[in-house]
Image: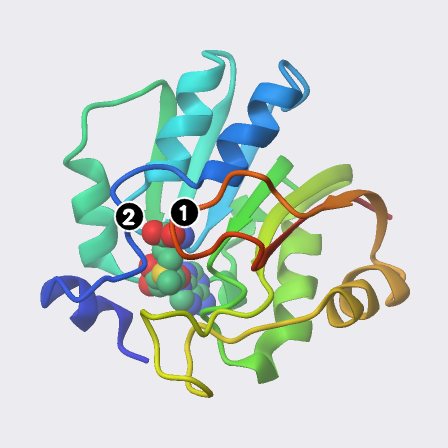
């Protein structure tokens, strides 16, 4: 998948122009719980990065994306708080990312990567977090809505069972909360799962 080319071609149907509703819902329900440094892998043009940064001026938020064009587009927005953007590959994290983060926010990165890379994804986010760091994410369970042809991806769907197996039963994380968000982008209602986990 050539993500950078898609950003250059402005073929980015996943980019809704505003932050993920399940993220806003979680932050409103948990004021002040997210603290410290936050990594957003696959941050695209940065809507979620800016929403997190705007929620608390004390947060340092890093958006990481493979696509230089996505990072360029993210940098064109007015700053919302203490956010930064970097071009980089989650699967080849540079040393300064390792063990640095108190929180990770996942949204449409896990579903974008090849499903064969999912264990590597879990290893990468585990390595990026500090001990007892928090992983919060919204996962697309069944992404085959009107935006995409059925059976093809990305996005690639998942299941609660797969997520628990890869993150929790692997011994890397322990589950804190899981629920179907009540707020979603149009067309994703009931198709997403929010998971919050703590690093073991
Ligand atoms: C479907 S888009 C979602 C972007 C953003 N989360 C949003 O919802 O607008 C997936 C993003 O993940 C990025 N990505 C894919 N593989 C990546 C990797 N290995 N490391 C970092 N970013 C990656 C892509 O460049 C793309 O911006």
Who's the residue at 55% across and 51% down the image? 95
Who's the residue at 50% across and 80% down the image? 114
According to the picture, the residue beneath numbered tag 1 turns out to be 185
* Colour setting: rainbow
- Residue 197: x percent and y percent? 77, 45
- Residue 89: x percent and y percent? 43, 63
Who's the residue at 51% across and 76% down the image? 156
Who's the residue at 28% across and 48% down the image? 16
Precedes in sequence: disc 1 or disc 2? 2
Say if mark 1 contacts mark 2, CB within 8 Å. yes
According to the picture, the residue beneath numbered tag 2 turns out to be 16
Q: Quadrant of residue 104?
A: top right
For this rendering, which residue is in front, 14 or 4?
A: 14
Residue 74 has which mark?
none
For this rendering, which residue is in front, 52 or 144?
A: 144
> Is residue 70 among what the camera can see?
yes
Where 23 falls versus 116 (above or below)?
Answer: above
Where 183 falls versus 165 (above or below)?
Answer: above
Q: Secondary structure at mark 1?
A: loop
> Is residue 88 among what the camera can see?
no
Answer yes or no: disc 2 within 8 Å of ligand 1: yes
For this rendering, which residue is in front, 178 or 34?
A: 178
| Left or right, 184 with reference to 70 | right
For this rendering, which residue is in front, 154 or 38?
A: 154
Assign ligand 1 to one image quadrant.
bottom left
Where 134 falls versus 59 (above or below)?
Answer: below
The residue furthest left is: 9
């Amino acid at each position: 998948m050539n993500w950078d080319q898609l950003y250059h071609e402005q073929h980015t149907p996943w980019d809704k122009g505003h932050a993920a509703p399940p993220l806003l819902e979680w932050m409103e329900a948990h004021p002040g719980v997210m603290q410290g440094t936050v990594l957003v892998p696959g941050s695209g043009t940065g809507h979620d990065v800016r929403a997190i940064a705007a929620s608390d001026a004390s947060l340092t938020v890093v958006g990481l994306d493979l696509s230089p064009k996505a990072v360029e587009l993210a940098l064109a927005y007015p700053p919302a708080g203490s956010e930064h953007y970097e071009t980089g590959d989650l699967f080849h994290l540079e040393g300064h990312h390792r063990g640095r983060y108190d929180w990770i926010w996942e949204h449409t990165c896990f579903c974008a990567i090849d499903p064969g890379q999912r264990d590597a994804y879990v290893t990468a986010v585990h390595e990026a977090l500090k001990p007892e760091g928090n992983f919060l994410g919204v996962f697309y369970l069944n992404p085959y809505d009107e935006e995409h042809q059925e059976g093809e991806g990305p996005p690639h769907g998942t299941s609660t069972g797969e997520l628990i197996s890869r993150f929790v039963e692997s011994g890397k994380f322990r589950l804190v909360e899981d629920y179907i968000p009540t707020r979603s982008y149009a067309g994703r209602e009931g198709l997403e799962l929010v998971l919050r986990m703590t690093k073991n």
